[in-house]
Amino acid sequence: MSPTSGPWWSHIFDFSDYGDLLALVHNSILAGAILGVVGGLIGVFVMKRDLAFAVHGISELSFAGASAALLFGANVVAGSVAGSLIAALLIGLLGARARDRNSIIAVLMPFGLGLGILFLALYTGRSANKFGLLTGQIVAVDDPQLLALLVISVVVIAGLLLMWRPLTFASVDPDVARARGLPVTAISIIFMVLLGLAVAISIQVVGALLVLSLLVTPAAAAMRVTSSALLTPLLSVGFAVVSVVGGIMLALGGGLPISPYVTTVSFLIYVVCHIAGRRRVPARLPALTKELAT
C-alpha cells in the first residue's frame, strides 16, 4: 500500500471533510428518513404475511424496469415503479396460496435479474449508474427524485393507514376474515401494489440486491422484542430510520456504496433485539405459568 493511500480502514471511516460532504447529501438523508417510515410500516405486514421472499422477487423486476429505463433514457424511478407493479400484480393475482406464490416468485426472480443484467450490459453510460441500481448511491437522490419518492411514500402510508385494521385481520387469520365478509383477495392485491411501490422507491437508496435490509429486517427485529400491536410498528419504523439514515451518515465518511453500512446497522439492531428477545421470554414464563394456573 502506498503512503498516500493510507490504511485500509480510512476508506471505510474517514470524516476529515465531513461537514462539506454533509451538505451534498441532504436529499439522501431526507429520502432515507422517509423510506425508514415506509419500510418500517409495511415491513410489519411483510412479516405477518410471510412475504419476505416476495420482496426480493419484486425487487428483481423493479431492477429490470430501472435498468430498461436507464438503457432507453427514460425516467429511472418510473421504470423501477413499473417493474415493481408488474411483479406485485402477478404475485398478488396468481399466488393466492403460499405454495403457488413461492413458485411464481422463484420464476420471476431469475427472469427479472437476467433482464436487468442484459439491459445494463447494453448500457454504455457511466458505470456508477449500473452499480448504483444494485447497491444504492449516496448522492443519487436529486430534487425530482425526492419529490417522486415523497409522493409515492404518501400514497403507500395513506393506503396502509386506511386499510390497517382489515389488513391486520386478513394477515393474522385470512380464513376467519373471509368468513366475516372481508374481501381478503382484494386486500391482498392492494397490499401487493403498495408493497411494489415501497420496493421501487427503496431501490433508489439501498439498491435492488439489499432491499430486504429495509423492508424486512427492522420489522423482524421489532417482533423479537415485542408483540404489541402499537409498539411493533413504532419500533420497526425507528429501527428502519436509524438503519438508513445512520448508514448514509457512515457511508458519507467512507465514500463507499451506502448498502454495506445500511445492512450492517440493520443487522446489528436485529442481533441486539434477538438477544433481548431470548432473555425476555424466560423472564415472562413464571408470570405466564401463574396466569394459566389461575
Image (cartoon, rainbow, N blue to C red):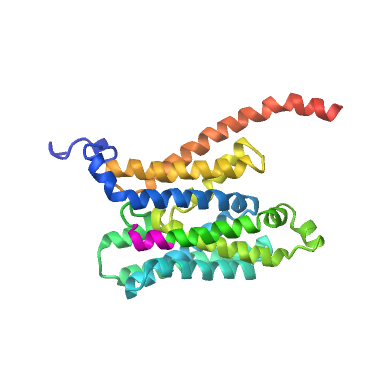
The residue shown at (46%, 65%) is 62
In the shown orientation, is residue 53 left or right of residue 72? right
Q: How many marks?
A: 0
Please check the rendered image and state whether residue 146 is part of the magenta-colored stretch, yes or no.
yes
The residue shown at (67%, 30%) is 281
Q: Say which quadrant the N terminus sits in.
A: top left
In the shown orientation, is residue 119 left or right of residue 199? left
Q: Position of residue 86 (x, y in %)?
A: 52, 71
Please check the rendered image and state whether residue 277 is part of the magenta-colored stretch, yes or no.
no
The residue shown at (57%, 65%) is 193
Q: Position of residue 164 (x, y in %)?
A: 65, 54
Q: Position of residue 153 (x, y in %)?
A: 49, 58
Q: Main secondary structure of the magenta part?
A: helix
**Can I make out residue 261 in this image?**
no
Quadrant of the rendered structure where residue 21 is?
A: top left
Residue range highlighted in magenta: 141-148
Query: In the displayed image of the protein, which residue is found farthest to the right?
Result: 294
In the shown orientation, is residue 233 left or right of residue 264? right
The residue shown at (72%, 63%) is 184
Q: Position of residue 25 (x, y in %)?
A: 31, 49
**Can I make out residue 58 in this image?**
yes
Q: Say which quadrant the C terminus sits in.
A: top right
Query: In the displayed image of the protein, which residue is found farthest to the bottom?
Result: 72
